């Protein structure tokens, strides 16, 4: 029977996403579907899958890998002070600091969760206030990220704010759960030992920071050193966590954080995600459903009464998020964002698992909490997708600020693709402003070029900053200030190019644009390679550069792409190397393609390949 249960579980893990794809079920997370199928196959209905030692082991490993991948989901760039000390404009035109808004939102969630837990105790529905508070304040980070990526707003102010709220809703309850389990496990005096777990994580990070770069160079298909390192980190920190009395899921989560800080390649992330969500994690979710006993739940009037109350509490706990978001975003999207943060499943399951070990909750109560979380997890993404409306600002992929108004920047402003870029032009010269203000929709006049003035006015609140004054030194100063302010890409123009300056700018991560060199290069191209010159200047056929992020087109040969006959791929940049493409070239995540083709097709393909 053990072998049959394992076979059925693995078979269902394969079939569930296939059936969902065929039926075009996109609003329900796969994890929720796996739990529901587990309920049908387990104690509650058919009882075809039973509890076995093999499934228990793989399921426990699944929750550990789930927490590891959750740790890897955290975007530390969003948590950096530089990124959030300056405000960004939301779609409603208001100045928004995502970290501040998210912190206020989650603070309200924490207060509401405690009040709801106290209310449940007063009504005699559930007596453990601490456990209920932890569960109510959790947010399913993985579901939130997937939904935001689908809407392509992860990099926008509202997307960042929702993501940061979800990060707090995963990290803080996890830390509180560790404290809860230590205190209720009778080891309160050992609580300080948890510090050793964080010390171990820091030591592992420092120890493997440089070796990891070397691993990436020497790894082979038969060694997969990056994957081996990931599992070493998992088991090392899980072991330390268990030794100091902390929960193993906290150790696994910290292992994911360490792996993230090691800055793995996209290929490594994809391999780890494939291992986790391809095998271990589905087993955990299916087994969770299998272990639910809804017959006992429905036979117990008190527990059955608990179910609707829990569903309401899950929503009410996130009401402060909606109220906080309404002060920064339009009401419709604020409501949708608050509803999305009510999604909760990933931390709820490990939390209930810990509570069961401590005998802090009955099996029936645990089933009620899980079923309530499943109901909420089904409803929230559906409400978000049907309510959230993309604004023009949300649809723009990157914001560009060009400081300096001249004939070249005017041409760039007019030619940059308005579906990809939101371009703002800045100038300090009143006569230039008066000349071009009727032609440039998003033109702003600055009184001077002082760095404090630029910072205060939000000039560095952009993805790409371009300095094109006639004064080379001023370009360097403003460009360096933009880089220090955390701008992702900084481009400065230089009339006179000095070799030492070029090398220094390269080290600082600043890109150089030289007018004189460009004119000479274009003339040389026209003389030596007129076909290349025509491609660059052709208005009907475009030359494009795209980083492949869409997993539907990675791991496949170029010849297998359904639009391969519509474009010509000239070069592929992989890491620090350029490679010549062939039909049999297998595209990897993060590959940078240089290609050409008719602009309508090339535009569509660019959007398709760059979509995460």
Image (cartoon, rainbow, N blue to C red):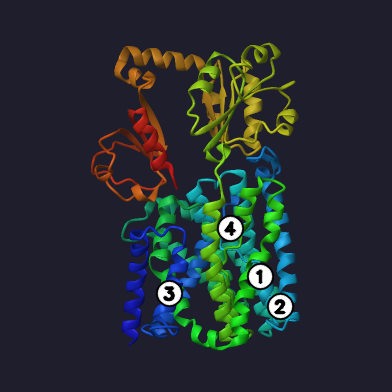
**Do the residues bearing badges 1 and 2 touch, measured as CB atoms within 8 Å?**
yes
First along the sequence among labels 1 and 2:
2
For the residue pair 96 and 342, the one nearer the viewer reads as: 342
Give how far across and how far down residue 51 sits, in percent. Answer: 42, 85
**Do the residues bearing badges 3 and 2 touch, measured as CB atoms within 8 Å?**
no
Q: In the displayed structure, would residue 288 be above or below residue 466?
A: below
Give how far across and how far down residue 453 sits, in percent. Answer: 74, 28
Query: Viewed as shown, does residue 1 lie left or right of 193?
Result: left
Distance from Cα at disc 4 to Cα at disc 1: 15 Å
Q: Quadrant of residue 539?
A: top left
Identify the residue shown where x is 62% and y is 19%. 404
Q: Residues within 10 Å of mark 3 (few under 14, many from 20)?
A: many
Element marked by disc 4: helix
Identify the residue shown where x is 55% and y is 15%. 495
Distance from Cα at disc 1 to Cα at disc 3: 25 Å
Asked whether residue 196 is in view, the answer is no
Q: Which mark is residue 286?
A: 3
Distance from Cα at disc 4 to Cα at disc 2: 24 Å
**Do the residues bearing badges 1 and 3 touch, measured as CB atoms within 8 Å?**
no
Q: Which mark is residue 340?
A: 4
Q: Quadrant of residue 603?
A: top left
Asked whether residue 61 is in view, the answer is yes
Q: Residues within 10 Å of mark 1 (few under 14, many from 20)?
A: many
Distance from Cα at disc 3 to Cα at disc 4: 23 Å
Identify the residue shown where x is 61% and y is 71%. 311
First along the sequence among labels 4 and 2:
2
């Amino acid at each position: 029977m053990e072998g049959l249960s394992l076979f059925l579980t693995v078979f269902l893990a394969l079939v569930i996403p296939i059936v969902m794809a065929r039926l075009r079920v996109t609003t329900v997370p796969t994890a929720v579907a796996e739990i529901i199928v587990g309920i049908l196959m387990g104690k509650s209905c058919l009882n075809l899958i039973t509890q076995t030692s093999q499934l228990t082991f793989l399921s426990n490993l699944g929750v550990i890998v789930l927490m590891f991948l959750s740790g890897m989901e955290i975007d530390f760039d969003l948590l950096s002070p530089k990124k959030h000390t300056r405000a960004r404009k939301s779609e409603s035109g208001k100045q928004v600091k995502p970290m501040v808004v998210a912190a206020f939102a989650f603070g309200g969630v924490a207060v509401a969760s405690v009040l709801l837990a106290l209310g449940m105790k007063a009504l005699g529905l559930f007596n453990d206030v601490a456990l209920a508070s932890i569960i109510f304040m959790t947010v399913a980070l993985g579901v939130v990220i997937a939904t935001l990526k689908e809407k392509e707003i992860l990099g926008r102010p509202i997307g960042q704010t929702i993501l940061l709220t979800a990060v707090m809703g995963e990290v803080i309850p996890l830390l509180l759960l560790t404290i809860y389990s230590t205190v209720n496990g009778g080891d309160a005096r050992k609580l300080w030992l948890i510090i050793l777990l964080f010390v171990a994580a820091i030591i592992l990070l420092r120890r493997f920071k440089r070796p990891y770069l070397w691993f990436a160079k020497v790894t082979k298909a038969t060694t997969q050193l990056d994957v081996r390192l990931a599992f070493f980190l998992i088991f090392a920190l899980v072991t330390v966590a268990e030794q100091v009395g902390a929960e193993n899921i906290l150790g696994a989560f910290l292992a994911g954080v360490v792996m993230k800080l090691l800055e793995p390649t996209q290929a490594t992330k994809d391999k780890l995600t494939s291992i986790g969500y391809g095998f271990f994690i589905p087993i955990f979710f299916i087994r969770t459903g299998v272990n639910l006993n809804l017959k006992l739940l429905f036979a117990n009037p008190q527990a059955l009464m608990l179910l609707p109350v829990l569903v309401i509490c899950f929503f009410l706990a996130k009401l402060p998020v909606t109220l906080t978001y309404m002060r920064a975003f339009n009401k419709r999207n604020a409501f949708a964002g608050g509803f999305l943060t009510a999604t909760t499943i990933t931390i709820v399951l490990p939390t209930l698992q810990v509570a069961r070990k401590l005998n802090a909750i009955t099996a029936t109560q645990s089933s009620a909490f899980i079923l309530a979380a499943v109901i909420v997890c089904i409803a929230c993404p559906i409400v978000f997708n049907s309510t959230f409306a993309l604004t023009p600002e949300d649809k723009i992929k990157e914001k560009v600020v060009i400081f300096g108004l001249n004939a070249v920047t005017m041409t760039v402003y007019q030619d940059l693709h308005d579906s990809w870029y939101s371009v703002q032009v800045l100038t300090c010269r009143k006569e230039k402003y008066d000349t071009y203000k009727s032609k440039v929709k998003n033109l702003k006049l600055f009184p001077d070029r002082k760095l404090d003035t630029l910072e205060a006015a939000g000039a560095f609140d952009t993805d790409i900053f371009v300095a094109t004054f006639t004064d080379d030194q001023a370009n360097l100063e403003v460009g360096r200030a933009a880089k220090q302010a955390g701008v992702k890409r900084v481009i400065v123009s230089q009339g006179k190019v000095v070799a030492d300056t070029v090398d220094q700018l390269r080290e600082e991560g600043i890109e150089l644009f030289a007018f004189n060199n460009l004119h000479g290069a274009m003339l040389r191209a026209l003389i030596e390679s007129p076909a290349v010159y025509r491609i660059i200047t052709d208005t009907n056929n475009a030359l494009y550069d795209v980083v492949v992020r869409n997993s539907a087109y990675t791991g496949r040969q170029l010849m297998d792409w359904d639009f391969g006959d519509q474009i010509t791929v000239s070069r592929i940049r992989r890491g620090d190397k350029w490679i010549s493409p062939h039909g049999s070239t297998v595209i990897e995540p993060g590959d940078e393609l240089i290609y050409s083709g008719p602009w309508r097709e090339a535009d569509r393909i660019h959007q398709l390949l760059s979509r995460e």
